[in-house]
Amino acid sequence: MLVNVWKHGGRDYTLVSLVYRSTRFARASNLTVQPAGWTLGLAHFMDFSDRHWSLIGSVQGPLDGREPPTFWLRLRWRG
């Protein structure tokens, strides 16, 4: 696993990870074998200046293209 984190001004961070996974099963039932390969993950975390709002965005997926990447976004308000 290789990970790098960059801290931007304030409370903003960007994270990049590269993970090698050996051959494994895709489900707990052990019926589908997933081949070995690399997975890339990118994420960005930020707090807005008033610190009431935060935003996290992420994308990750295998580099060989056998599955489409997974995207998610979370917007949070703290009172």
Image (cartoon, helix red, strand yellow):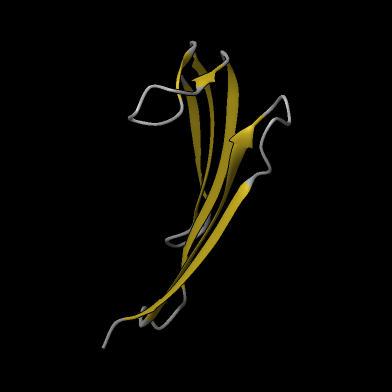
Residue at the (51%, 58%) spot, across then down: 9
Residue at the (36%, 78%) spot, across then down: 51
17 or 71, nearer to the observer: 71
User: Along the horizontal axis of the image, is 44 left or right of 24?
Assistant: right
Q: Is residue 19 above or below residue 42?
A: above
Estimate the x, y position of residue 41 in percent, counting from the top left. Answer: 56, 38
Estimate the x, y position of residue 10 in percent, counting from the top left. Answer: 45, 62
Q: Is residue 21 above or below residue 14?
A: above
Q: Residue furthest left?
A: 79
Residue at the (58%, 15%) spot, across then down: 35
Residue at the (66%, 37%) spot, across then down: 67
Estimate the x, y position of residue 70 in percent, counting from the top left. Answer: 59, 49
Estimate the x, y position of residue 72 in percent, counting from the top left. Answer: 54, 60
Q: Quadrant of the C terminus?
A: bottom left
Picture quarter containing residue 25?
A: top left
Number of numbered callouts drawn: 0
Q: Residue furthest bottom?
A: 79
Q: Is residue 77 above or below residue 35?
A: below
Picture quarter containing residue 40?
A: top right
User: Along the horizontal axis of the image, is 1 left or right of 39?
Assistant: left
Q: Residue furthest right?
A: 65
42 or 23, nearer to the observer: 23
50 or 72, nearer to the observer: 72
Q: Is residue 57 above or below residue 49?
A: above
